Amino acid sequence: MPGLVIDIVDLPRPAGSVKRLRLSAPAPARLGNEVIGVPEGSGLDIEVTLTSMDEGVLAQARAQCRIHGECVRCLRDLDEERTVSIDELYFLPEAIEAQRAQGDEEAEDLLELGESTLDLEPALRDAIIPTLPLRPLCRPDCPGLCPECGERLEDLPAGHHHEVIDPRWAALAGFVDRAAGPASPGSEAGADDAAGHAPGGEPGGGRHRGEGA
């Protein structure tokens, strides 16, 4: 039988009859949520006990799997070996029909046996997916990434920061620099005149030596 489908032809029908088996199978696709789960194709090791019941077959199992994801704050890889337990009753088709006839609204959610098989995948999904975090973290106080450079804050020195200039002010500064322009050739002479120096470089308001007041 492929994957997680178990042949139950050799499971005796009398209630209380037991079949035990161990199987290894690749993990199916989408065994998790958007950010964390069991990688598709990774190995699953499962010990299974099947017990015949009046209404179907009770499947009890322990599955070992690898959980992989990434921290939603710092994007660090997360890996964990996990063991999950399965304890689900698979109903015979006629037992489900009887419950539907009685108006049982939950009958649509019951696990159904195949003609001679039991598919463990839906029970495995129910055992794994609800236990996975929607926002996995490498640790509760993970500081995350620097919003400017994208490096992990825990790997950066204390007080790490970036000079952030509002682009509106940066544009204004450029405009002011362009408006000022380069210094004109006569600007230095004008500065000398303002300081009280004659064009000839002598102080005294342009008087020559020897002139009287």
Image (spheres, rainbow, N blue to C red):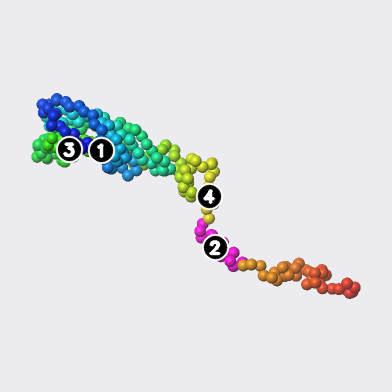
Of badges 1 and 3, the one in the foreground is 1
205 relative to 62, above or below: below
Of badges 4 and 1, the one in the foreground is 1
The boundaries of the magenta stretch are: 166-180
The disc labelled 1 sits on which kind of residue? Arg
Of the two numbered discs 1 and 3 on the same chain, state the one appearing first in sequence.
Answer: 3
- Left-right relation of 53 to 172: left
Per the image, is 177 magenta? yes
Of the two numbered discs 2 and 4 on the same chain, state the one appearing first in sequence.
Answer: 4
Residue under the image location 47 percent in, 45 percent down: 151
Tag shown at residue 125: 1
The disc labelled 3 sits on which kind of residue? Leu
C-alpha gap between disc 2 and disc 3: 68 Å
Dot 2 falls on a residue whose secondary structure is helix
Q: Position of residue 180 (x, y in %)?
A: 61, 66
C-alpha gap between disc 1 and disc 3: 14 Å
- Left-right relation of 112 to 204: left
C-alpha gap between disc 1 and disc 2: 59 Å
Of the two numbered discs 1 and 2 on the same chain, state the one appearing first in sequence.
Answer: 1
